[in-house]
Amino acid sequence: MPFNHLIKLRLDYANFLALNNTVVPNYTKYVSGLKNIKPNKNNSELKEIYNYHQAGAKFPFILMRDSMKTTKINFTKYNAGEKKGAEGIELLNKMEALLDKFTQKYFE
């Protein structure tokens, strides 16, 4: 086996461990924690901001998390998760714009 191939395998394994042991568990806690936030039911603006935040945070994550259920990364699912990540970022950007509008309305 060529040396370059061994280095690539070692880096792939290191990436897998970092994602599987650190990134995925921490992000799982973050996404789960979002469910504990209860926006004021009477404030439709806050509910809309919250809904965009929750959707944007978990949208790409589900596929990426599922891509690592075995000891090898399922790159088909992982890449699909990355593509969904762009859609998640759009939702988070919308959330940020709504939050800016909300803070300007009530705090400035």
Image: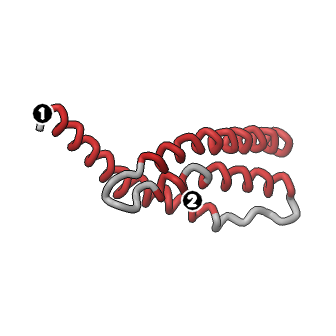
Q: Secondary structure at mark 1?
A: helix
Instruction: Tell me if mark 2 has few (under 14), some (14-19) or many (20+) residues whose alpha carbon lies within 10 angstroms of its own.
Output: some
Q: Earlier in the sequence, mark 2 or mark 1?
A: 1
- The quadrant the C terminus occupies is top right
Query: Looking at the rendered structure, which numbered label has been put on residue 92?
Result: none
Residue found 41% across the figure and 51% down from its top: 74
Q: Is residue 28 above or below residue 10?
A: below
Q: Position of residue 25 (x, y in %)?
A: 43, 60
Q: Position of residue 9 (x, y in %)?
A: 22, 42
- For marks 2 and 1, give the CA distance: 40 Å
Q: Is residue 37 above or below residue 59?
A: below
- The quadrant the N terminus occupies is top left
Residue found 52% across the figure and 42% down from its top: 82
- Asked if residue 26 lies left or right of residue 70, the reply is right
In the picture of the structure, the residue carrying the numbered disc 1 is 3
Residue found 57% across the figure and 59% down from its top: 31
Return the residue nearer the eye: 53 or 6: 6
In the picture of the structure, the residue carrying the numbered disc 2 is 31
Instruction: Tell me if mark 1 has few (under 14), some (14-19) or many (20+) residues whose alpha carbon lies within 10 angstroms of its own.
Output: few
Q: Position of residue 71 (x, y in %)?
A: 31, 58
**Mark 2 is on which residue type?**
Val
Is label 2 or label 1 in front? Answer: 1
Q: Is residue 6 visible?
A: yes
Q: Position of residue 97 (x, y in %)?
A: 75, 38
